[in-house]
Amino acid sequence: MKRIEFADAPGRRYDLFFLFVLYFNKEHCLANFVNPDKAREDTEFMERLWEEVSPVPEELLPFFLLNDDGKSLITLCRFRGGPELLEDFRPEEVFPDMGAMTGAVLNFWLNCPDADPSDPGDLRKINAAIRTSGCDYRLKSALYSLLIDPKRALETLVGELTAKAGLSPDYYTLKTREELKASFDPEQFNRDIRASGWSVDLSHYEKVFVSFCTYAKNCIRCSDLGDGNGLLLLGQEYAAYLSSLHQRVEVPQLDVFGTAIAEKNRLDILNLILARGEVSIKDVEQELKFSGTNAYYHLSLMIKANMIKTRNRGKAVYYSINRRFFDSVIRVLQKYGELSAYTQRGCDAGGPEWARRMGE
């Protein structure tokens, strides 16, 4: 990175969108945006944040619900690359008009970019597309509501964005933006990002704008601003998250594994996964009578230990056993089982004294 500049606007914009994405995709966020090294702390942080932002009108679902690719309409439309990301976000300008909003929604969810709801023929096609889509009933209902009264949908969206933009971040701030700016070391960040295996490459930018998030505390995201400039978006806990990624290697850490497996609740989860092949968070809650917070806490520790892995299917997250990891545990533990074979062969003069005594 040849030159670094700090900008507050992108982080504030991303934080605002993150509040709504978290509200409508809580399970996905808890499964994918939590640092396993701080599982309970991060889970409680997001639970509090979810409660703080609640309630959000269901009719805003089409804007913030994640699709099968893990993307939301609002971030796709209003957090794409470009110099406008450096400008303060104005909720009243989220969409230029009702037509642009409706077109964006129809294109994102139904792949009908040119359909005009005011045309009776197009409206029939849109209705058919909604009925035959794979959307769940909540999303279908929200899409119908938007088509019936787009003006109200746009006013609700702008009103909610405006209201949540005024949410005080003080309770959730671990470090101020000024402290984060002062502690940011570009060279150290480059070393950490390479060691973690994270696919962020900033080497080809002439100038990089760095912006920090408060709510999206583990965020690491790079966007292209054009003209040789890039944007690096970092959550306030990005350094700890990178450290966690760096420690999660294929060679098993037996102390971490031992801590994770030496607890009955986690053994129960592991056995449930073994019996079913893979489970969702709702399976864990229903079968083992866990609260959502406790379930996510235990699963995060198991992910940290590399015992389980995750898979997203649409909006749902599924957990399965990481069999490659357990195979590597077996290989590592084998060295402790070689003693019996070693003593049965007879210990030569080079063997340790305690081994010779055991073999006598």
Image: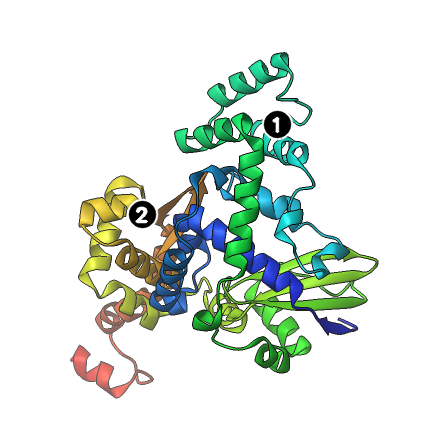
| Numbered badge on residue 111 | 1
Which mark is drawn over residue 346? none
Question: Horizontal placement of 169 versus 337: left or right?
Answer: right
Q: Nearer the viewer, residue 256 or 252?
A: 256
Q: CA distance from mark 1 to mark 2?
A: 31 Å
Bin the neighbour count of mark 2 within 10 Å (Cα to Cα): few under 14, some 14-19, many 20 and up: some
- Look at mark 2 in the image and give the residue it sits on: 281
Of the two numbered discs 1 and 2 in the rendering, the one whose residue sits closer to the viewer: 1
Q: Quadrant of residue 300?
A: bottom left
Label 1 crowd bin: few (<14), some (14–19), many (20+), radius 10 Å: some
Identify the residue shown where x is 26% and y is 72%. 339
Count how many numbered circles sit on residues in the image.
Answer: 2
Amino acid on which disc 1 is placed: Asn
Residue with the most extreme bottom position: 353
Q: Quadrant of the C terminus?
A: bottom left
Query: Which comes sooner in the sequence, label 1 or label 2?
Result: 1
Question: Residue 177, how many percent across, how many down?
Answer: 59, 75
| Residue 227 placement (x, y as % from top left) | 84, 58
Quarter of the picture containing the N terminus is bottom right
